[in-house]
Amino acid sequence: MIARELIPVPSYAEEVEAGLTGYPKSLPAKLFYDAAGSALFEDITQLPEYYLTRTELGILQDRAGEIAAAVGAGVAVVELGAGTAAKTCTLLQSLVKRQMRVPYYPVDISSSALAGARQRVANEVDRVSVRPVIADFADGFGFLSDIPGRKLVLYLGSSIGNFDPATAVSMLTDIRGELGTGDALLLGTDMVKKEKILLPAYDDAQGVTAEFNSNILRRMNRELGADFDLDAFRHVARWNVQQSRMEMHLKSLRMQTVDLSVLRLRIGFVPGEHIHTENSYKYTMPAVRSMLSGAGFQLVQSWFDRKKWFGLHLARV
Ligand code: AVI
Protein backbone atom coordinates (compact mmCIF):
# COMPACT_ATOMS: atom_id res chain seq x y z
CA MET A 1 0.00 0.00 0.00
CA ILE A 2 2.75 2.44 0.99
CA ALA A 3 4.81 1.44 -2.07
CA ARG A 4 1.83 2.17 -4.34
CA GLU A 5 1.37 5.63 -2.93
CA LEU A 6 4.98 6.38 -3.81
CA ILE A 7 4.32 5.77 -7.52
CA PRO A 8 4.27 9.20 -9.23
CA VAL A 9 1.22 10.05 -11.35
CA PRO A 10 2.28 9.72 -15.02
CA SER A 11 1.38 12.44 -17.56
CA TYR A 12 -0.95 10.06 -19.42
CA ALA A 13 -3.07 9.35 -16.30
CA GLU A 14 -5.99 11.57 -17.35
CA GLU A 15 -6.23 9.89 -20.76
CA VAL A 16 -6.28 6.47 -19.07
CA GLU A 17 -9.01 7.58 -16.68
CA ALA A 18 -11.11 9.05 -19.51
CA GLY A 19 -10.60 5.91 -21.61
CA LEU A 20 -11.53 3.42 -18.90
CA THR A 21 -14.51 5.38 -17.62
CA GLY A 22 -15.85 6.05 -21.16
CA TYR A 23 -18.06 3.74 -23.20
CA PRO A 24 -16.87 1.65 -24.93
CA LYS A 25 -13.70 1.43 -22.83
CA SER A 26 -10.44 2.36 -24.53
CA LEU A 27 -6.78 3.03 -23.81
CA PRO A 28 -4.41 5.28 -25.81
CA ALA A 29 -2.26 3.23 -28.21
CA LYS A 30 0.81 5.32 -27.43
CA LEU A 31 0.97 3.43 -24.10
CA PHE A 32 2.18 0.34 -25.96
CA TYR A 33 5.64 1.78 -26.35
CA ASP A 34 7.45 1.40 -23.04
CA ALA A 35 10.80 -0.44 -23.29
CA ALA A 36 9.16 -3.90 -23.26
CA GLY A 37 6.46 -2.82 -25.76
CA SER A 38 9.00 -1.29 -28.14
CA ALA A 39 11.01 -4.53 -28.06
CA LEU A 40 7.82 -6.53 -28.73
CA PHE A 41 7.01 -4.24 -31.66
CA GLU A 42 10.48 -4.93 -33.08
CA ASP A 43 9.67 -8.66 -32.79
CA ILE A 44 6.34 -8.09 -34.57
CA THR A 45 8.14 -6.51 -37.54
CA GLN A 46 10.04 -9.81 -38.02
CA LEU A 47 6.94 -12.05 -37.93
CA PRO A 48 5.99 -13.93 -41.11
CA GLU A 49 2.39 -12.65 -40.83
CA TYR A 50 3.36 -8.99 -40.33
CA TYR A 51 4.01 -8.10 -43.98
CA LEU A 52 4.10 -4.30 -43.49
CA THR A 53 7.75 -3.69 -42.55
CA ARG A 54 9.37 -5.98 -45.08
CA THR A 55 6.99 -4.92 -47.86
CA GLU A 56 7.79 -1.25 -47.33
CA LEU A 57 11.51 -2.04 -47.11
CA GLY A 58 11.22 -3.98 -50.39
CA ILE A 59 9.66 -0.95 -52.13
CA LEU A 60 12.42 1.29 -50.78
CA GLN A 61 15.10 -1.15 -51.95
CA ASP A 62 13.58 -1.63 -55.41
CA ARG A 63 12.59 1.98 -56.04
CA ALA A 64 15.10 4.12 -54.12
CA GLY A 65 16.65 5.35 -57.39
CA GLU A 66 13.28 6.42 -58.81
CA ILE A 67 12.24 8.03 -55.56
CA ALA A 68 15.53 9.96 -55.36
CA ALA A 69 15.07 11.11 -58.98
CA ALA A 70 11.54 12.32 -58.26
CA VAL A 71 12.72 14.15 -55.12
CA GLY A 72 15.59 15.85 -56.98
CA ALA A 73 19.01 16.92 -55.74
CA GLY A 74 19.81 19.19 -52.81
CA VAL A 75 17.62 17.96 -49.97
CA ALA A 76 17.97 17.46 -46.25
CA VAL A 77 16.17 14.30 -45.15
CA VAL A 78 14.05 14.50 -41.98
CA GLU A 79 12.66 11.20 -40.75
CA LEU A 80 9.75 11.39 -38.30
CA GLY A 81 9.74 8.51 -35.81
CA ALA A 82 13.04 7.30 -37.27
CA GLY A 83 13.77 4.68 -34.58
CA THR A 84 17.10 3.13 -35.50
CA ALA A 85 16.73 4.15 -39.19
CA ALA A 86 16.39 0.51 -40.24
CA LYS A 87 14.67 1.35 -43.55
CA THR A 88 16.36 4.59 -44.51
CA CYS A 89 19.84 3.61 -45.68
CA THR A 90 18.93 2.53 -49.23
CA LEU A 91 17.16 5.82 -49.86
CA LEU A 92 20.08 7.79 -48.39
CA GLN A 93 22.44 5.80 -50.65
CA SER A 94 20.42 6.83 -53.73
CA LEU A 95 20.25 10.46 -52.62
CA VAL A 96 24.04 10.77 -52.10
CA LYS A 97 24.50 9.83 -55.75
CA ARG A 98 22.81 13.13 -56.62
CA GLN A 99 24.37 15.50 -54.10
CA MET A 100 27.77 15.86 -52.38
CA ARG A 101 26.43 15.39 -48.85
CA VAL A 102 23.03 14.52 -47.44
CA PRO A 103 22.11 16.03 -44.09
CA TYR A 104 19.94 13.45 -42.30
CA TYR A 105 17.82 14.43 -39.29
CA PRO A 106 16.32 11.36 -37.62
CA VAL A 107 13.60 12.53 -35.22
CA ASP A 108 12.44 10.35 -32.35
CA ILE A 109 11.31 10.51 -28.74
CA SER A 110 13.91 7.89 -27.78
CA SER A 111 17.54 9.01 -27.48
CA SER A 112 18.76 5.40 -27.45
CA ALA A 113 16.98 4.73 -30.77
CA LEU A 114 18.64 7.86 -32.21
CA ALA A 115 22.06 6.66 -31.08
CA GLY A 116 21.32 3.43 -32.97
CA ALA A 117 20.27 5.45 -36.06
CA ARG A 118 23.53 7.41 -36.01
CA GLN A 119 25.57 4.23 -35.72
CA ARG A 120 23.70 2.40 -38.47
CA VAL A 121 23.94 5.27 -40.97
CA ALA A 122 27.65 5.80 -40.17
CA ASN A 123 28.28 2.10 -40.84
CA GLU A 124 26.22 1.83 -44.01
CA VAL A 125 26.36 5.11 -45.97
CA ASP A 126 29.15 7.58 -46.78
CA ARG A 127 28.66 11.34 -47.14
CA VAL A 128 25.64 11.55 -44.84
CA SER A 129 25.76 13.94 -41.86
CA VAL A 130 23.50 12.60 -39.12
CA ARG A 131 21.91 15.24 -36.88
CA PRO A 132 19.54 13.54 -34.43
CA VAL A 133 16.55 15.48 -33.08
CA ILE A 134 14.81 14.37 -29.88
CA ALA A 135 11.17 15.44 -30.09
CA ASP A 136 7.70 14.42 -28.98
CA PHE A 137 5.19 15.06 -31.78
CA ALA A 138 2.60 15.87 -29.12
CA ASP A 139 4.53 19.17 -28.81
CA GLY A 140 4.11 19.91 -32.53
CA PHE A 141 6.51 20.02 -35.47
CA GLY A 142 8.18 23.40 -34.79
CA PHE A 143 11.60 21.72 -35.01
CA LEU A 144 11.07 21.37 -38.80
CA SER A 145 11.36 25.11 -39.42
CA ASP A 146 14.75 25.13 -37.62
CA ILE A 147 16.20 22.74 -40.21
CA PRO A 148 17.86 24.70 -43.02
CA GLY A 149 17.45 24.06 -46.75
CA ARG A 150 14.96 22.13 -48.87
CA LYS A 151 13.51 19.23 -46.94
CA LEU A 152 12.27 15.74 -47.70
CA VAL A 153 10.19 14.59 -44.71
CA LEU A 154 9.84 10.82 -44.32
CA TYR A 155 6.92 9.41 -42.39
CA LEU A 156 7.19 5.67 -42.94
CA GLY A 157 5.95 2.41 -41.47
CA SER A 158 2.21 3.20 -41.75
CA SER A 159 2.57 5.15 -38.52
CA ILE A 160 -0.02 7.60 -39.91
CA GLY A 161 -2.48 4.67 -39.85
CA ASN A 162 -2.58 4.66 -36.05
CA PHE A 163 -4.44 8.01 -36.13
CA ASP A 164 -8.09 8.44 -37.05
CA PRO A 165 -8.61 10.22 -40.40
CA ALA A 166 -9.34 13.67 -38.89
CA THR A 167 -6.30 13.53 -36.60
CA ALA A 168 -4.12 12.29 -39.48
CA VAL A 169 -5.16 15.26 -41.62
CA SER A 170 -4.60 17.70 -38.78
CA MET A 171 -1.15 16.22 -38.07
CA LEU A 172 -0.15 16.41 -41.73
CA THR A 173 -1.52 19.98 -41.82
CA ASP A 174 0.76 20.87 -38.89
CA ILE A 175 3.73 19.31 -40.72
CA ARG A 176 2.77 21.15 -43.91
CA GLY A 177 2.61 24.41 -41.93
CA GLU A 178 6.31 24.10 -41.05
CA LEU A 179 7.38 23.42 -44.66
CA GLY A 180 8.02 25.75 -47.60
CA THR A 181 7.94 25.71 -51.39
CA GLY A 182 9.94 22.81 -52.85
CA ASP A 183 9.75 20.70 -49.68
CA ALA A 184 8.31 17.21 -49.98
CA LEU A 185 6.81 14.40 -47.90
CA LEU A 186 7.28 10.66 -48.43
CA LEU A 187 4.43 8.90 -46.64
CA GLY A 188 4.10 5.14 -46.09
CA THR A 189 0.57 3.71 -45.94
CA ASP A 190 -0.72 0.18 -45.60
CA MET A 191 -3.34 -0.49 -48.29
CA VAL A 192 -6.75 -2.20 -47.97
CA LYS A 193 -6.48 -5.90 -48.68
CA LYS A 194 -8.22 -9.21 -47.97
CA GLU A 195 -9.25 -9.86 -44.39
CA LYS A 196 -7.47 -13.23 -44.47
CA ILE A 197 -4.16 -11.34 -44.88
CA LEU A 198 -4.96 -8.55 -42.42
CA LEU A 199 -6.20 -10.63 -39.49
CA PRO A 200 -3.09 -12.82 -38.99
CA ALA A 201 -0.88 -9.72 -39.29
CA TYR A 202 -2.54 -8.52 -36.07
CA ASP A 203 -3.09 -11.95 -34.48
CA ASP A 204 0.00 -14.01 -35.24
CA ALA A 205 0.43 -17.71 -34.53
CA GLN A 206 3.25 -17.19 -32.01
CA GLY A 207 1.15 -14.78 -29.94
CA VAL A 208 3.66 -11.90 -30.10
CA THR A 209 0.94 -9.36 -31.00
CA ALA A 210 -1.22 -10.69 -28.15
CA GLU A 211 1.73 -10.16 -25.82
CA PHE A 212 2.26 -6.63 -27.23
CA ASN A 213 -1.43 -5.84 -26.63
CA SER A 214 -1.54 -7.14 -23.06
CA ASN A 215 1.74 -5.38 -22.24
CA ILE A 216 -0.41 -2.26 -21.91
CA LEU A 217 -2.05 -3.89 -18.86
CA ARG A 218 1.33 -4.87 -17.44
CA ARG A 219 2.36 -1.23 -17.80
CA MET A 220 -0.78 -0.02 -15.94
CA ASN A 221 0.02 -2.49 -13.17
CA ARG A 222 3.53 -1.12 -12.83
CA GLU A 223 2.97 2.58 -13.41
CA LEU A 224 -0.56 3.10 -12.08
CA GLY A 225 -0.52 0.58 -9.24
CA ALA A 226 -3.23 -1.40 -11.07
CA ASP A 227 -4.08 -5.04 -10.47
CA PHE A 228 -5.12 -6.23 -13.94
CA ASP A 229 -5.04 -10.04 -14.10
CA LEU A 230 -3.42 -10.58 -17.51
CA ASP A 231 -4.95 -14.05 -17.80
CA ALA A 232 -8.42 -12.58 -17.45
CA PHE A 233 -8.17 -10.61 -20.72
CA ARG A 234 -7.81 -12.01 -24.23
CA HIS A 235 -6.27 -10.34 -27.29
CA VAL A 236 -8.81 -9.69 -30.05
CA ALA A 237 -7.96 -8.44 -33.57
CA ARG A 238 -10.81 -7.33 -35.85
CA TRP A 239 -11.18 -5.96 -39.36
CA ASN A 240 -13.67 -3.07 -39.31
CA VAL A 241 -14.61 -2.83 -42.97
CA GLN A 242 -16.82 0.27 -42.59
CA GLN A 243 -14.02 2.27 -41.01
CA SER A 244 -11.28 0.60 -43.09
CA ARG A 245 -9.20 -0.26 -40.05
CA MET A 246 -7.75 -3.15 -38.12
CA GLU A 247 -8.66 -2.90 -34.45
CA MET A 248 -7.06 -4.42 -31.39
CA HIS A 249 -9.04 -5.03 -28.23
CA LEU A 250 -8.58 -6.74 -24.88
CA LYS A 251 -11.62 -8.81 -23.97
CA SER A 252 -12.57 -9.41 -20.36
CA LEU A 253 -13.03 -13.14 -19.86
CA ARG A 254 -15.10 -12.79 -16.71
CA MET A 255 -16.91 -10.39 -14.43
CA GLN A 256 -14.13 -8.53 -12.62
CA THR A 257 -13.14 -5.30 -10.89
CA VAL A 258 -9.75 -3.70 -11.39
CA ASP A 259 -8.16 -1.25 -8.98
CA LEU A 260 -5.90 1.52 -10.29
CA SER A 261 -4.59 2.75 -6.97
CA VAL A 262 -2.56 5.72 -8.30
CA LEU A 263 -5.73 7.07 -9.95
CA ARG A 264 -7.93 6.07 -6.98
CA LEU A 265 -10.13 4.37 -9.53
CA ARG A 266 -12.05 1.07 -9.57
CA ILE A 267 -13.25 -0.20 -12.93
CA GLY A 268 -15.78 -3.00 -13.34
CA PHE A 269 -15.87 -5.33 -16.38
CA VAL A 270 -18.67 -7.62 -17.47
CA PRO A 271 -17.80 -10.90 -19.23
CA GLY A 272 -17.00 -10.24 -22.91
CA GLU A 273 -16.49 -6.50 -22.42
CA HIS A 274 -13.73 -4.97 -24.55
CA ILE A 275 -11.02 -2.38 -24.00
CA HIS A 276 -10.28 -0.90 -27.44
CA THR A 277 -6.50 -0.41 -27.57
CA GLU A 278 -5.55 0.40 -31.19
CA ASN A 279 -6.73 1.30 -34.66
CA SER A 280 -4.58 0.70 -37.71
CA TYR A 281 -6.17 2.32 -40.77
CA LYS A 282 -5.75 0.77 -44.21
CA TYR A 283 -5.99 3.04 -47.23
CA THR A 284 -7.32 3.15 -50.76
CA MET A 285 -5.77 5.61 -53.22
CA PRO A 286 -8.79 7.97 -53.03
CA ALA A 287 -8.34 7.99 -49.23
CA VAL A 288 -4.59 8.75 -49.57
CA ARG A 289 -5.32 11.56 -52.05
CA SER A 290 -8.00 13.08 -49.88
CA MET A 291 -5.82 12.89 -46.74
CA LEU A 292 -2.91 14.59 -48.51
CA SER A 293 -4.97 17.27 -50.24
CA GLY A 294 -6.91 17.90 -47.01
CA ALA A 295 -3.55 18.75 -45.42
CA GLY A 296 -2.42 21.01 -48.30
CA PHE A 297 -0.10 18.54 -50.05
CA GLN A 298 -0.18 17.55 -53.72
CA LEU A 299 0.43 13.91 -54.56
CA VAL A 300 3.28 13.58 -57.09
CA GLN A 301 3.81 9.84 -57.40
CA SER A 302 3.12 6.57 -55.54
CA TRP A 303 5.16 3.38 -55.51
CA PHE A 304 3.86 -0.05 -54.52
CA ASP A 305 5.04 -3.62 -54.11
CA ARG A 306 3.86 -6.11 -56.73
CA LYS A 307 0.73 -7.07 -54.78
CA LYS A 308 -0.10 -3.43 -53.98
CA TRP A 309 -0.16 -4.23 -50.27
CA PHE A 310 1.79 -1.15 -49.22
CA GLY A 311 2.24 2.30 -50.75
CA LEU A 312 4.89 5.01 -50.59
CA HIS A 313 3.56 8.39 -51.65
CA LEU A 314 5.63 11.41 -52.60
CA ALA A 315 3.77 14.68 -52.09
CA ARG A 316 4.81 18.30 -52.54
CA VAL A 317 3.86 21.39 -50.63
C1 AVI B 1 3.29 1.14 -35.40
N1 AVI B 1 2.12 0.71 -36.18
C2 AVI B 1 2.24 1.16 -37.58
C3 AVI B 1 1.79 -0.71 -36.05
C4 AVI B 1 0.54 -1.04 -36.91
O1 AVI B 1 0.63 -1.97 -37.71
O2 AVI B 1 -0.46 -0.35 -36.78
C5 AVI B 1 1.53 -1.09 -34.61
C6 AVI B 1 1.09 -2.52 -34.46
N2 AVI B 1 0.03 -2.93 -33.82
C7 AVI B 1 -0.07 -4.23 -33.87
N3 AVI B 1 0.91 -4.69 -34.60
C8 AVI B 1 1.66 -3.64 -34.97
Image: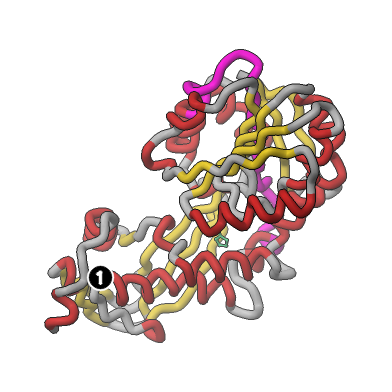
Q: Quadrant of the C terminus?
A: top right
**Residue shown at the point (27%, 74%) measured from the top left:** 269
**Residue shown at the point (58%, 75%) measured from the top left:** 208
Residue 242 in view, yes or no: no
Residue hosting label 1: 224
Report whether 278 appears left or right of 203: left
Identity, as a three-letter code, of the amino acid under mark 1: Leu
Report whether 79 appears left or right of 165: right
**Residue shown at the point (30%, 76%) measured from the top left:** 221
Query: Magenta span has 184?
Result: yes
* 10 Å crowding of disc 1: few (<14), some (14-19), many (20+): many
In the image shown, does 271 or 284 lie closer to the viewer?
284
Disc 1 on helix, strand or loop?
loop
**Residue 178, placed above or below residue 105:** above
Residue farthest toward the top in the current orientation of the protein? 181
**Residue shown at the point (62%, 57%) measured from the top left:** 116
Quarter occupied by residue 270: bottom left
Residue 154 in view, yes or no: yes
Report whether 113 appears left or right of 56: left
Quarter occupied by residue 54: bottom right
In the image shown, does 49 or 45 lie closer to the viewer?
45
The residue stretch that appears in magenta? 175-197
**Residue 139, placed above or below residue 271:** above
Q: Quadrant of ligand 1?
A: bottom right
**Residue 95, placed above or below residue 106:** above
Q: Quadrant of the N terminus?
A: bottom left
Query: Magenta span has 85?
Result: no
